[in-house]
Amino acid sequence: MNLLHFLNSFFSDGANWHGENGIPHRLLEHVQYSAIALAIAAAIGLPLGLFTGHTGRGGYALSAFATGARALPSFGLLVLMTVWLGQLGTTPAMVPLVALAVAPILVTAHEAIRNVDPAPVDAARGMGMSPLSVLFQVELPVALPLILGGLRSAAIQVVSTATIAAYISLGGFGRYIIDGLAQQTYAQVVGGAVLVAGLALVTMGLFWAVGRLVVSPGVRRRR
């Protein structure tokens, strides 16, 4: 059977559209894992990246951290956390996903603030604006497109990698891939892989739409 036959077999099966193993339920689980991991990573990475970018400190440390975080094997970290915590559940799955997402968010936020044109920043300081006002009213609006790019990159990586949660008995689209391989039901494997790829593309589109809404037209034109 070729790829199209596998896809037709998977998506035309009514059993794949209902119940706990149905596509809508697995989609909800996958989005939930991804959203939680991205929210935690953003809560860690954005404040730290904005602060270091605004103050100009910690650039080398961030670069070293990002290199180390990207080198971490997500699957190996998942197994390690499961053994260390001695439990199956959401917590062991969140650790590798958050570690994966923090690096692009943190580094991109730092670099976005550092690359803001210094002329308006100096003018704002000369007008007596406080450091926080300079950051949030001058630097952040200009840096927002790059910051959103870092969030988009992190979100796509998390959505694509959240399939590993199924290895420790969680749900999501990875359930189709893990179970399909175990049962040698390759239509299920192909269907799960296509669903993950489709969700990653939808995520990319959502961040593009958010960028169009929140980034000012003047900043978009300059970029």
Image: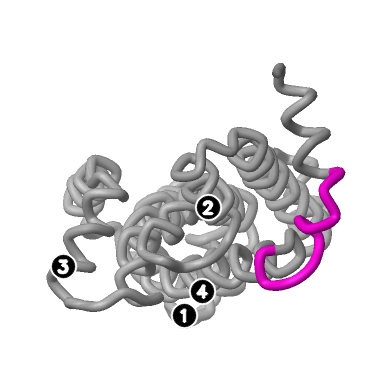
8 and 145: which one is in front? 8
Q: What's the residue at 76%, 46% (across, down)?
A: 220
Q: Earlier in the sequence, mark 4 or mark 3?
A: 4
According to the picture, the residue beneath numbered tag 1 turns out to be 132
Count every numbered label the image shows and give the total: 4
Q: Name the quarter where the N terminus is drawn.
A: top right
Q: Earlier in the sequence, mark 2 or mark 4?
A: 4
Residues in magenta, as a range: 12-21
Q: What's the residue at 54%, 44% (across, down)?
A: 180
Q: CA distance from mark 1 to mark 2?
A: 43 Å
163 and 150: which one is in front? 163
Q: Is residue 33 left or right of residue 164?
A: right
In the picture, the disc for residue 36 is 4
Cβ–Cβ below 8 Å for labels 1 and 4?
no
Residue 143 position in % (x across, y down): 57, 55
According to the picture, the residue beneath numbered tag 2 turns out to be 174
**Which amino acid type is marked by label 2?**
Gly
Q: Is residue 218 magenta?
A: no
At numbered mark 1, what does the secondary structure look like: helix, strand or loop?
Answer: helix
Q: Name the quarter where the C terminus is drawn.
A: top right
User: Disc 4 vs disc 3: which is toward the camera?
Assistant: 3
Q: CA distance from mark 2 to mark 3?
A: 20 Å
**Which amino acid type is marked by label 1?**
Leu
112 and 193: which one is in front? 193
Q: CA distance from mark 4 to mark 3?
A: 22 Å
According to the picture, the residue beneath numbered tag 3 turns out to be 83
